[in-house]
Image (cartoon, coloured by chain):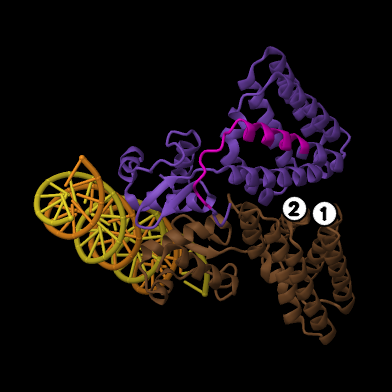
Chain colours: A brown, B purple, C yellow, D orange
DNA sequence: TTTTACATTTTTGAATGCAAAACTATCGAT
DNA sequence: ATCGATAGTTTTGCATTCAAAAATGTAAAA
């Protein structure tokens, strides 16, 4: 198993919440599960700690990182900035074909909304946001986006919505598609920001934050 | 020596260019220099690879990452986005004391400009940009900024400037300070973007990119 | 009963050792 | 002379081992 694969597997375990935030990461157990020794496992944990998904406590092992309200706010704030930038760049660079593909996903998503299928709705929703970032054509930006969104994914795509919130989100997505089609970068950036600001309010209202007592400030992402 | 310290030492070696971009990283040599064994060294290299400073080639060791023109462009683009966001947030949150401190550094910097002291000018310049990011009060943002700027630091703060460019940069910094003092977030964001766009043009014109042939797309930062 | 001191066990962090992969150098064939 | 194969060397990646630190458990004292 390659290094990157080990990192990916553990990342998935953390993002799925299989090891819940704050829980101790059972080194020995993970080792036999992944059929690797402690050396490559620990290398992966250090990388994930740099990403902010794992918290390392010297001589006391590693835990799945918990997010405070403040962390959540900060991450959403950065995410807003990244998506806004991606939106602007995407409008300069996106092809007609890519726009059509997004429009198709958008259509499906709206149908899922009408059907009340939140899971499928979220799936399409996320695909659209990611497609916009991809269309920006900036791998550095895409990398940061991936890492920041990973940390708030559960909050973003698990929080239930009130009918009003959901209706608003769909309206915003109409505007997002519209701005894309008009290639109105500034407009798109504004809508994406508002969209995420609303989502953040939802999440924080829902009290999704995972703790109050950890001042995890990862260096990288 | 603590893990984070090892990472920091190696990062410094890379940023100083002591191991030039593209060069092989001599594992054994670094080990005896830092007085550690290969295990912690390799853990650090994996972390730095996630940051984008090191390129890992499976079974072929690690090299100091090289930046292509495209990498440079992408990094500056993201940096623009991050600084613009930081500028907006800073205007909402910065205290009068912090503004005064920045104004003082600005004054010094202008004096260094008048003296033609580029080194000192750059030092103040960088301090101002970092102070703005700090004033944004968002550690996640600050972390991303640190990691992105680290990768373009040499390009950003080593490239020589023509007198015209330099004069323009100083004018832009006047506007930056002014926007901060008026707490004009949107205005500040615009100026910061333009400022960085000009710097990027300078850097790319100077042909600072380090290679043409590496498609390094680090996951994280 | 609670607390404190001490011994034992567990876990962590790093050094070493080992098998596999890649690199180098030599030699033979064209 | 150049190219390609092959033996030998080096380097990598990982498992294992070892010392130190922390956690746990036990027993004596307050």
Q: Quadrant of residue C20?
A: bottom left
Question: Is there any visible trace of residue B78 in the rendered image?
Answer: yes
Q: Residue at x 59, y 39 (%)?
A: B152
Q: Earlier in the sequence, mark 1 or mark 2?
A: 2
Left or right of D10, for residue B162: right
Residue D23 horizontal/vertical position (percent):
44, 66
Q: Which residue is mark 1?
A: A185
Say what secondary structure mark 2 lies in.
Answer: helix
Question: Do the numbered discs 1 and 2 sit on residues whose CB atoms are within 8 Å?
Answer: yes
In three-dimensional space, the C-alpha distance between marks 1 and 2, rounded to whole angstroms, equals 7 Å
Does dot 1 land on a helix, a strand or a loop? Answer: helix
Subunit under mark 2 = A
Dividing the picture into quarters, in which one does residue A114 lie?
bottom right
Q: Magenta stretch: residue B47 in it?
A: no
**Going by the picture, which residue comes out furthest to the top?**
B115
Q: Is residue A140 left or right of residue A187?
A: left
Camera-side residue of B111 and A132: A132
Magenta residue check for B202: yes
Place of residue A101 in the rendered image (x, y in percent of width and height, measured from the top left):
74, 71
According to the picture, the residue beneath numbered tag 2 turns out to be A89
The image shows residue A215 at horizontal and vertical percentages of: 63, 54
Instruction: Classify the position of the N terminus of chain A by image quarter.
Output: bottom left
For label 1, count other residues whose C-alpha is less than 10 Å away and answer few (under 14), some (14-19) or many (20+): many
Q: Does the rendering let one see residue B147?
A: no
Span shown in magenta? B194-216
Q: Is residue A44 left or right of residue A112?
A: left
User: Is B207 above or below relative to A159?
Assistant: above
- In the picture shown, does residue B86 fall above or below A65? above
Subunit of label 1: A
Determine whether A136 is above or below B127 in the image: below
Q: Position of residue B55 (x, y in %)?
A: 46, 50
Q: Which mark is residue A11?
A: none
């Amino acid at each position: 198993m390659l290094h990157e694969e080990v990192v990916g597997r553990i990342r998935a375990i953390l993002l799925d919440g299989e090891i819940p935030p704050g829980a101790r990461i059972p080194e020995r157990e993970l080792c036999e599960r992944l059929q690797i020794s402690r050396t490559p496992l620990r290398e992966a944990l250090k990388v994930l700690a740099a990403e902010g998904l794992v918290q390392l406590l010297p001589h006391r092992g590693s835990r799945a990182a918990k997010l405070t309200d403040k962390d959540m706010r900060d991450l959403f704030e950065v995410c807003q900035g990244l998506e806004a930038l991606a939106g602007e760049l995407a409008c300069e660079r996106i092809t007609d074909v890519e726009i059509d593909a997004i429009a198709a996903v958008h259509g499906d998503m709206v149908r899922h909304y009408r059907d009340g299928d939140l899971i499928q709705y979220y799936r399409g929703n996320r695909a659209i946001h990611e497609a916009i970032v991809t269309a920006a054509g900036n791998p550095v930006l895409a990398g940061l986006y991936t890492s920041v969104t990973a940390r708030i994914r559960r909050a973003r795509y698990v929080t239930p919505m009130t009918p009003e919130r959901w209706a608003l989100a769909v309206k915003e997505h109409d505007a997002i598609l519209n701005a894309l089609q008009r290639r109105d970068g500034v407009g798109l950036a504004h809508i994406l920001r508002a969209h995420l600001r609303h989502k953040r309010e939802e999440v924080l209202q829902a009290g999704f934050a995972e703790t109050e007592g950890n001042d995890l400030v990862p260096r990288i992402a």
